[in-house]
């Protein structure tokens, strides 16, 4: 991979944010795609997708606060803090208007960013994200947050295996599954992860989605129990002119189980108005 820049600077929020830019063969005038990973991840999870996108776009991705090489500032965190970190990445890479894709928690951040900064988003992709949780769904994420506060990471990891991967993929690719779960264990042991999970479990922008003005693609796995097709349909119904893709047979961890398919969908969507 041709990485033109790797940077680790302190944002206005006090968080040290690591980001990297992957150059495009078309040069510095290529449009920019900015990628945001999800909980218990790191920007490297986008590697297979980035390799496809870089043929047409400058690709920028970063580690969320509390993840990877980014820092974990003291105090309580909010969704707005994650948006402020994203604005810092904008400033660092001298960006003005981008294509934006967010996965899971990254999809929540992308929603908030597109609502608050419509002038900065050309096209938006919301991947395996949440909106309009039911009472039962809220109870489940609250229970997982309580497990974290109690120091019980193993229960959440075991449950994540079922939510994240289809049975066939787990059987055929145990090494890839274990790599992903090892990353979850590593991030889960860091102090900031609980704060990030709190933001994820308590944030819901269903009532503001109609404010998103960018052309939007909503995508999730057909069998994802958390970021489920019902949520995708709700987002689709509330975001004017949006498109929806439900990927057959897949669960939550699309960036590991089906990166080629995700790359194909994102590439096609972002190229619609890029040439």
Image (cartoon, rainbow, N blue to C red):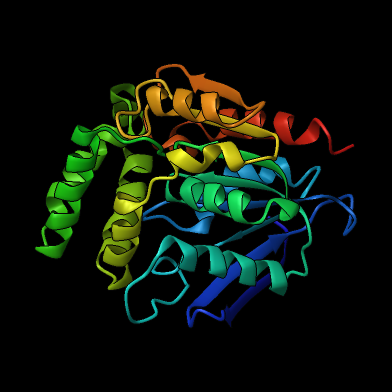
Which one is in front, 122 or 132?
A: 132
Residue under the point 44% across and 38% down: 206
Task: Return the x and y of residue 185 as percentages of the image width and height.
Answer: 26, 58
Q: In which quarter of the image is the N terminus?
A: bottom right
Question: Taking 259 as reference, is 22 above or below it?
Answer: below
Q: In which quarter of the image is residue 166?
A: top left
Q: Quadrant of the C terminus?
A: top right
Tell me, yes or no, if residue 103 can be seen here: yes
Task: Return the x and y of residue 121 as percentages of the image width and height.
Answer: 71, 49
Residue under the point 80% across and 30% down: 272
Which one is in front, 133 or 43?
A: 133
Q: Which residue lies furthest to the top in this view?
A: 248
Task: Return the x and y of residue 182 as percentages of the image width and height.
Answer: 30, 54
Which one is in front, 139 or 152?
A: 139
- Relative horizontal placement of residue 41, taking residue 187 as reference (left or right): right
- Relative horizontal placement of residue 118, taking residue 148 as reference (left or right): right
Residue under the point 78% across and 47% down: 57
Residue under the point 28% across and 34% down: 163
Question: Taking 244 as reference, is 11 above or below it?
Answer: below
Tell me, yes or no, if residue 186 can be seen here: no
- Relative horizontal placement of residue 26, taking residue 252 as reference (left or right): right
Task: Return the x and y of residue 216 as percentages of the image width and height.
Answer: 64, 34
Q: How many numbered discs, if any?
A: 0
């Amino acid at each position: 991979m041709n990485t033109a820049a790797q940077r680790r600077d302190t944002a206005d929020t006090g968080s040290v944010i690591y980001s990297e830019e992957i150059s495009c063969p078309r040069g510095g005038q290529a449009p920019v795609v900015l990628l945001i990973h999800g909980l218990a991840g790191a920007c490297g999870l986008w590697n297979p997708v980035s390799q496809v996108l870089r043929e047409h776009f400058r690709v920028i991705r970063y580690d969320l606060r509390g993840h990877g090489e980014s820092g974990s500032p003291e105090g309580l965190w909010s969704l707005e803090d994650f948006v402020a970190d994203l604005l810092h990445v904008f400033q660092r890479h001298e960006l003005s208007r981008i294509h934006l894709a967010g996965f899971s928690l990254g999809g929540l951040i992308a929603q908030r960013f597109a609502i608050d900064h419509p002038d900065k988003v050309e096209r938006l992709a919301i991947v395996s994200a949440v909106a309009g949780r039911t009472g039962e769904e809220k109870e489940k994420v609250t229970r997982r947050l309580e497990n974290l506060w109690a120091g019980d990471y193993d229960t959440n990891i075991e449950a994540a295996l079922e939510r994240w991967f289809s049975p066939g993929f787990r059987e055929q690719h145990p090494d890839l599954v274990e790599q992903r779960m090892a990353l979850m264990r590593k991030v889960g042991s860091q102090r900031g992860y609980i704060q990030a999970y709190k933001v994820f479990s308590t944030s819901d922008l269903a009532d503001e989605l109609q404010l998103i003005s960018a052309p939007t693609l909503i995508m999730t796995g057909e069998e994802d129990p958390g970021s489920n097709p019902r949520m995708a349909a709700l987002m689709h119904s509330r975001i004017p002119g949006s498109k929806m893709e439900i990927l057959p047979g897949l669960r939550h961890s699309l960036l590991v189980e089906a990166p080629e398919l995700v790359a194909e969908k994102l590439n096609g969507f972002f190229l619609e108005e890029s040439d």
